[in-house]
Amino acid sequence: MVIFINTLLFFIEFAGNIYISLVLLRFLLQVVRADFYNPISQFIVKVTHPLLKPLRKVIPCIGRQDTSSLVLAYLLEFLLVIINLAIIYLFLKLNTITSLLTLFLIALIKLIELVFYLFYLLLIGAAILSWLAPDSNFAPARLIKHSTSSLLSPLRRFIPPIGIIDITPVIALILLLLIKSVVIGTISYFSGVEAGLLFISGG
C-alpha cells in the first residue's frame, strides 16, 4: 500500500508541476516579451488558456504583467498540497491536518522552489546552447535565449567568454542556488513551516 501511495503521489506531483511550470513559463515569456509566434509559445498559450480565461475576468493585469498567471500557478500549487495531504491522511492514516495558514505557506514555498527549478533548467539549456550551438535558430533555442537573457545579459557585461565558452549560465546557476537557499530558508524559519510538512506534501 505504501509503495502504491508513494507512486500515486509522485505522478500527481509530477503532472501538477508540469502544468504549473507551463503557467509560470507563460508569465515569464510575457515578461521578457518572447516571440509569441514561436511554436512552443503557442503551445503554452493554448494549454494554459482554458484555466486562465475565467481567472482574467476577476484578476486584472498589473501594468503589462499577467497577474492572473501567477495567481493561477499559486492556486494550483495550493490545490496540489491539499490533494497530497488528503491522500496521505485517507490511505496511510497519517495525521496531516494543519492550519490553513501553514498550508498557504507550504504552497508558497513549493511554488518558489518550482520557479527556481524552472530557471535551473533554462540556464542549463542556455549553457548547452552557448557551448554546442550558439547560433542555433530552432524554436526551443530561441525561446531559451529569450527566457534567460534578462539574467545573463548583466553578467555578460562583467564576465567575458573564455575562448568560445560562455560561462555566464554557470555563474547564474550558482547565484540562483545561493539565492534559493537564502529565500526558502528565511521563509521557512520565520513562518515556522516544518520540513516534515514539506516532505509529506511532496517537497
Image: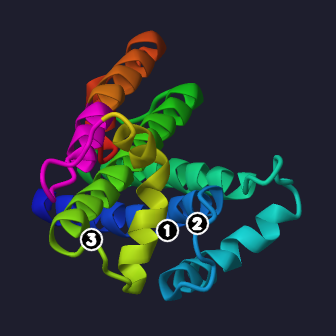
Query: What residue lies at 24% left-to-right and 64% top-to-bottom?
Result: 130
- Does the magenta portion include 161? yes
- Tell me residue 174's x, y (percent): 23, 35
Classify 10 Å Cα crowding around label 2: few (below 14), some (14-19), many (20 and above).
Answer: many
- Does the magenta portion include 14? no
Say which element carries label 3: loop
**Which residues are the magenta region?**
159-177
Q: Nearer the viewer, mark 3 or mark 1?
A: 3
Query: What residue lies at 77% left-to-right and 73% top-to-bottom?
Result: 53
Q: Which residue is denoted by mark 1 in the rendering?
A: 22
Question: Residue 182's image quarter?
Answer: top left
Label annotation for residue 134: 3
Is disc 1 in contact with disc 2, using a CB cutoff of under 8 Å? yes
Q: Quadrant of the C terminus?
A: top left
Is disc 2 in contact with disc 3, using a CB cutoff of under 8 Å? no
Q: Quadrant of the N terminus?
A: bottom left
- Tell me residue 3's x, y (percent): 11, 61
Mark before the other along the chain sequence, 3 or 1: 1
Amino acid type at image mark 3: Pro
Label annotation for residue 26: 2
In the picture provided, is 118 more to the left or to the right than 195? right
Could you give the CA–CA distance between mark 1 and mark 2, rounded to whole angstroms?
A: 6 Å
Query: What residue lies at 55% left-to-right and 64% top-to-bottom?
Result: 23
Query: What residue lies at 62% left-to-right and 78% top-to-bottom?
Result: 45
Classify 10 Å Cα crowding around label 1: few (below 14), some (14-19), many (20 and above).
Answer: many
- Tell me residue 20's x, y (percent): 49, 62
The answer to whether residue 90 shows anywhere in this view is: no
Could you give the CA–CA distance between mark 2 and mark 3, rounded to whole angstroms?
A: 24 Å
Say which element carries label 2: helix
Q: Nearer the viewer, mark 2 or mark 3?
A: 3
Classify 10 Å Cα crowding around label 3: few (below 14), some (14-19), many (20 and above).
Answer: some
